[in-house]
Amino acid sequence: MNQPHHDLARARWVKSSHSGSGDQCVEVARLSGAAHAVRDSKDPQGPALTFSPIEWRSFLDAVRRS
């Protein structure tokens, strides 16, 4: 399945409210078309995972169950 290209340089990143203290922080950005991206806050120039709206809902459901 082809993923749409998202301009992550323009993304507005927010620290997750579920991040731990210290260096265990995850940042989330809303992207166009209800997609989302997740990255490690310690490496803002590093890779990010992107999720389609369906994948994002599945991801959140899995996190809530764990």
Image (cartoon, grey):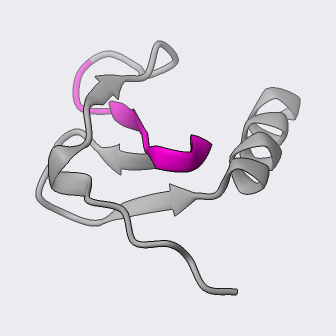
Q: Residue furthest front?
A: 33
Relative to 6, residue 14 above or below: above
Numbered marks: total: 0
Residue at x 64%, y 57% (from the top left corner): 52
Which of the two residues, 55 or 43, is positioned nearer the viewer here?
Answer: 55
Which of the two residues, 35 or 57, is positioned nearer the viewer here?
Answer: 35
User: Does the rendering let one see residue 22?
Assistant: yes
Residue 4, position as x, y percentages in the image: 50, 72
Residue at x 57%, y 47% (from the top left corner): 33
Residue at x 43%, y 44% (from the top left corner): 31
- Tell me where the magenta segment starts and ends, as one range: 22-34
The C terminus sits in image quarter: top right
Residue at x 35%, y 34% (from the top left corner): 27
Q: Residue furthest bottom?
A: 1
Q: Is residue 15 left or right of residue 3?
A: left
Relative to 20, residue 55 above or below: below
Which of the two residues, 40 or 55, is positioned nearer the viewer here?
Answer: 55
Relative to 44, residue 29 above or below: above
Residue 18, position as x, y percentages in the image: 52, 18
Which of the two residues, 34 or 62, is positioned nearer the viewer here?
Answer: 34
Q: Is residue 14 left or right of residue 56?
A: left
Does the magenta segment cover residue 43? Answer: no
User: Does the rendering let one see residue 36?
Assistant: no
Residue 41, position as x, y percentages in the image: 23, 39
Relative to 21, residue 6 above or below: below
Q: Is residue 9 left or right of residue 31?
A: left
The N terminus sits in image quarter: bottom right
Does the magenta segment cover residue 24? Answer: yes
Residue 14, position as x, y percentages in the image: 32, 23
